[in-house]
Amino acid sequence: MSYIDTIKHEYLGQFGSRSVYRILENVAGSRDDFDFGCTSTDLVIGGGSGEVPAIIFSDLDYCVGHFLLEWLHQQFALKSEEDVIRRLRVGGLDPEKIRTQISELAEAPHKQKIAFAGWSALDYYEAVKEYSSSPIAHPYRKDSVPFEHWLAQNIGEYAFFEMSQHLKASAELRPLLSELVEPLFENFHNDLN
C-alpha cells in the first residue's frame, strides 16, 4: 500500500510511468515530507511512500498559465506576430489583455506552487532522466525550460482541457481561448476513458 492510499483521492491517469491523482481531502503536514501534507485542490504525480516520491501541484491556474505561455510562445515562433494578433482579434479578444492575464497566472515562483515531497537529489535526477528519454509524446528537453516549468506546462495542459471546473483564476480564459488553443504535449494519459 502506498501513502496515497491513506488519502481520499481520485486516480486520473498516467504521466509517463507515474500515476496522477486529484486529492479530495485536506491532510495536515509538510509538503516536503515523503508522507506529505496536501489540500483538496492539489494534483499529485506519484504516491509517496510505497510508490514513487510525489510532486504536488498546489495551484492549477499557475500550471495553466505556464501551458498558455508556451502555447503563445509557439504561436509567435510559428507565425508572424500580426497573424497571431489577427487570430486573437477575430476571436473577439484583446491580444494585450490576454497576454497580460496569462503572464500574471504564471508569475508566482514555482517553489510556492510545486513541491517535491521527500525528494533527494537522486530522485530529481532520475525524474529528469525518465522524462527526458521515456516514450512520451514530447519528452523534456534540458535546453528548453527548467524542469519545474515543463512539469507545470504539462499539468496545465491537462487542467486546461480536462479540469476546467477546478480552475479559478484561469477559468475566465478557458471559454475565450478554447477555440484557439490546441494541445502541445499530450503526455498525460487518462486510463479511464
Image (spheres, grey):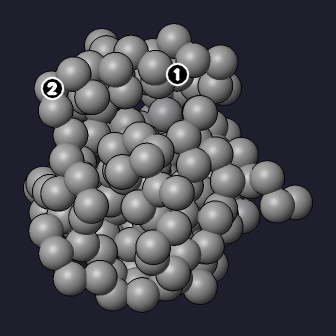
Q: Which residue was labeled with disc 1?
A: 139
Counting other residues with Cα less than 10 Å from the Cα at mark 1, is it few (<14), some (14-19), or many (20 or more)? some
Residue ranking furthest to the right = 193
Q: Nearer the viewer, residue 37 or 128?
A: 37
- Residue 19 can be seen, yes or no: yes
Q: Residue at x 25, y 28 (%)?
A: 124
Of marks 1 and 2, which one's residue comes earlier in the chain? Answer: 2
Q: Which mark is residue 121?
A: 2
Q: Quadrant of residue 79?
A: top right
117 vs 86, left or right, is left
Q: Where is residue 47 drawn, in percent x and y?
A: 44, 54
Q: Residue at x 25, y 64 (%)?
A: 36
Of the residues tagged 1 and 2, which is closer to the observer? 2
| Image height of 113 relative to 42, above or below | above
- Residue 184 can be seen, yes or no: no
| Three-letter residue code for mark 1 | Pro
Q: CA distance from mark 1 to mark 2?
A: 20 Å
Q: Nearer the viewer, residue 109 or 21?
A: 21
Residue ranking furthest to the front = 1
Counting other residues with Cα less than 10 Å from the Cα at mark 2, is it few (<14), some (14-19), or many (20 or more)? few
Q: Residue at x 41, y 61 (%)?
A: 3
